[in-house]
Structure formats: structure tokens, C-alpha cells
Image: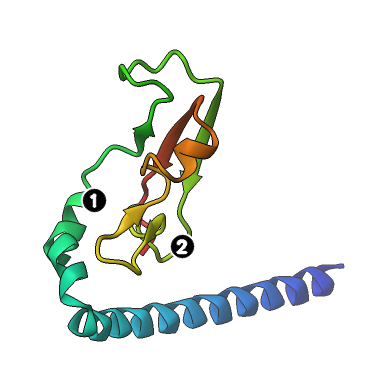
Amino acid sequence: MDQLRSWLTAILVGVAAVAYLSLSAKHKRRATLGQRLDDETPAEVKEVWKPDERITHRSRQPFEILYSGSTDGSNGDADVDIIAVHGLGSDVDWSWTWKGGDKPVNWLQDIDMLPAKVPSSRIIAYNYESR
């Protein structure tokens, strides 16, 4: 029984080491890729999104109400709460933003997007450091 436990522990440690090394290498590649993409970013996107602003996102509150379901700004009228959680390696602002036109559109916040489909909702973005 002790040999089996030792064998399983060794396998578990090996899998954890491989996962760590793989994620570490992926993170390094993403950091380099992100620097290259910043150089190729169109001018209209650079105008709205400046790399220095990324640091300020870390100091933001974890929950931010983007749409309250009412025109007067009160939060008590919502029938449903929608909480948007961005994925790993992404950003709370750019995960929910369409970047194809003249001006980026946050589809969680823009009145013609999700708020138009679910007008009686409170839309909340969850912000966390994912890089």
C-alpha cells in the first residue's frame, strides 16, 4: 500500500510540474506577443486604450455596475443580475468590447446592446487580475 501511495504521489508531482512549466512558458510567450501587438495596434484603438491605463485596472473595485436597469441610476429596480466574468489572460474592459468600427463598443454597457435585450437587468462586470 505504501508503494502505491508513493507511486501516485510521484505521478501527481510530475503532472503538477509539467502543468507549471507549460503555463509558465505560455505566459512568457503571451507577454512577448502582447508587446508586439501593442506596436501593431491601430491608431483609433490606441487613442481609446493606452497601455499605461492597464495598471489602473488593478486598483479598481472587483465589482462595477455597468447598467442598473433604470434611468435614474437606482439599483433597486432590477429583475435580474447579470455578472460578467472575463477569462484568464484577458482584461475586464476589452473582453466585452467590440473593436471593429470607428469607436470601440462595450456590449455590456452600450444602451443598444445587452441592456436593450434585458432592460430590467443590473449588469455587473467582475474585475480580477488574470495575467
Q: Position of residue 54 (x, y in %)?
A: 20, 59
Q: Residue 88 got which mark?
A: 2
Up/down of 70 relative to 49, above or below: above
Up/down of 115 relative to 27, above or below: above
Q: State the scheme by which the image is colored.
A: rainbow
Up/down of 31 relative to 116, above or below: below
Which quadrant would residue 73 be assigned to in this image?
top left
Q: Position of residue 59 (x, y in %)?
A: 21, 45
Label 2 element class: loop
**Amino acid marked by disc 1:** His
Label 1 element class: helix
Q: Quick one: which residue is furthest to the right in this view? A: 1
**Amino acid marked by disc 2:** Leu
Q: Position of residue 40 (x, y in %)?
A: 22, 85
Quadrant the C terminus occupies: bottom left
Asked if the residues shown at circle 1 and circle 2 are in contact, with their CB atoms under 8 angstroms apart, the answer is no
Q: Is residue 38 left or right of residue 12?
A: left
Up/down of 58 relative to 24, above or below: above
Q: Is residue 1 left or right of residue 99?
A: right
**Mark 1 to mark 2: distance in Å?**
15 Å
Q: Nearer the viewer, residue 50 or 25?
A: 50
Q: Residue 3 got which mark?
A: none
Q: Image point 44% across, 34% down: which residue? A: 123
Quadrant the N terminus occupies: bottom right
Q: Image point 18% across, 84% down: which residue? A: 39
Q: Which residue is mark 1?
A: 57
Q: Nearer the viewer, residue 74 or 86?
A: 74
Q: Nearer the viewer, residue 63 or 122?
A: 122
Query: Mark 1 or mark 2, which has the lower sequence index?
Result: 1
Q: Image point 56% across, 77% down: which residue? A: 19
Which quadrant would residue 11 be assigned to in this image?
bottom right
